[in-house]
Image (cartoon, helix red, strand yellow):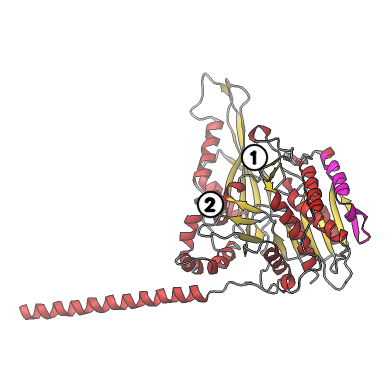
Amino acid sequence: MPGSEMKGARTRVRTTALVALIVFSLLLVFLCALLIRTYTFSPGGAGDQRWASGHPPPHAGHFSPGERQQMLAAFKAALRIPTVSGGDAQHNDSALAEFGQHLSKAFPAVFASSVVRHETVADYSHLFTVRGSNSSLQPYLLTAHLDVVPAIAGEWEVPPFSAEERDGFIYGRGALDDKLSVMGILQGLELLLNRGYIPQRSFYIGIGHDEEVGGNNGAKNIASVLLSRGVKIAFLLDEGSAILEGVIPGMEKQVAVIATSEKSSATIRLRVTTSSGHSSMPPKETSIGILAAAVSKLERNPMPRMFGQGPERGLFEHLTPQLSFPLNVVMANLWLFGPLISRMLEKKPSTNSLVRTTTAVTEFHAGIKANVIASSAQATVNFRLHPTHGLEELLQQVQHIISDERVKIEVLHSDPPIPMSSYAVDAFGYQLVKGTIGNVFPEAVVTPGLCTASTDTKHYQNITTELYRFTPMILKEEDISRVHGANERLSVRNYEAAVHFYFRLIQNADS
């Protein structure tokens, strides 16, 4: 028996060792496969920049002191005009009209040029047609919006419409969103015309006046005008993304994100109706308490992670060559590490928006008097849907999370999802923008990505499939909250670089 037991023990040891060896070998093969994929990984659309860097442009972006002074003065004057769009499509009509007058004064060459046609659309929006010398080249469209969101003066360090300059920064509502683009595009064209430059490729400039409330009068009508004339464009470039610095975990370099798609928006109303009464004899639950509980459930239960299923995947894959070990292994193998990256990204609001559909309770209305129990309460909730998240699925999830039939759900507004545009090597618009970023911001790594907000781009889907979003501004982590927040600002240096970007883009489109 002892000999038999010893023999059995040796067999078990050999078997265990063999199993361990097999497991170790499989693990080694698996790790080798990860490393091979990491160091041979090449994201799509990595870079054909022949439209931007093949030949130097005839006019370099060297602006005289006088030109710099003039462009900054024009930008500041634009920021001082309170072109505010409020709720329910309310506008400051006099400010919108004043802004149109400012454009004609700030850019005399644009308005006087024989190759530029200006039209006012829907009273306050603007359409510029720039006729190129070569009609065989397909035109493109640059878009922006002149309206801004309201600003609460008491939250600002300076008056929000003062355009005050401090420590090299210009403060003002619209400095980032989106008068930078409006003035930068037209300033770039103005400087080129002053140098005698006549574009070869025709292009359009569309400036909407109500983007902050949906763009249904401005951009939508501009698109209708172009469509009625049979215009088909090669690509569109709108606002909606930027150059990020210190925002993406593990990236020390600046990351210029060209958004190839954007989140759609859905807004719902939650309503609770109960009996009214005197506050001295309150019921166990009031309309306000019921609704507050429902809202709290939505905030405590975020929508499911969808990282890697949409255009945000391209962003991280393009960053892989720029990362060191072990982050490069993680990013090159999102099929395995996607859940880990999701958990990292969701820690910050700025990157959590890439992971999922976001939930924002934006309005809460209830009560008429301190001693009267409110008979009704309602809240507005805005969702920014991940491109792979449908409205019906969202509503089912909202209903499941709240799980209270007393809370009625009503859809106030929803946008259909927007398809992702190409960032392949033969995608003219993407590669043109990418190359121009390389010309003006050579330190930045350029990647495709997802715009987490909603833009006027959605209105132009019938005139092109190549829809891109990029604003030539550098945003650090602390700057992101300034967009639609207090103390919105842009550095003087960044505005000059933005003008240079559009100045160069127009020329690159001809090369």
Q: Using the numbered discs, state the Cα–Cα distance from disc 2 to disc 1 in whole angstroms.
A: 28 Å
The residue sitting at 50% across, 26% down in the picture is: 283
Q: Is residue 274 left or right of residue 160?
A: left
Q: Name the N-terminal-most of marks 2 and 1.
A: 2
Residue under label 2, please give it: 303
Does the residue at mark 2 contact the one at mark 1 (Cβ under 8 Å)? no
- Per the image, label 1 sits on a secondary structure element best described as loop
Q: Is residue 289 above or below residue 209?
A: above
Residue 148 image offset from top left, x and y in percent: 73, 44
The residue sitting at 87% across, 58% down in the picture is: 194
Residue 97 part of the magenta segment: yes
- Per the image, label 2 sits on a secondary structure element best described as loop
Q: What amino acid is at disc 1?
A: Ala
Residue 385 part of the magenta segment: no
Residue 301 image offset from top left, x and y in percent: 50, 47
Name the mark on residue 486: 1
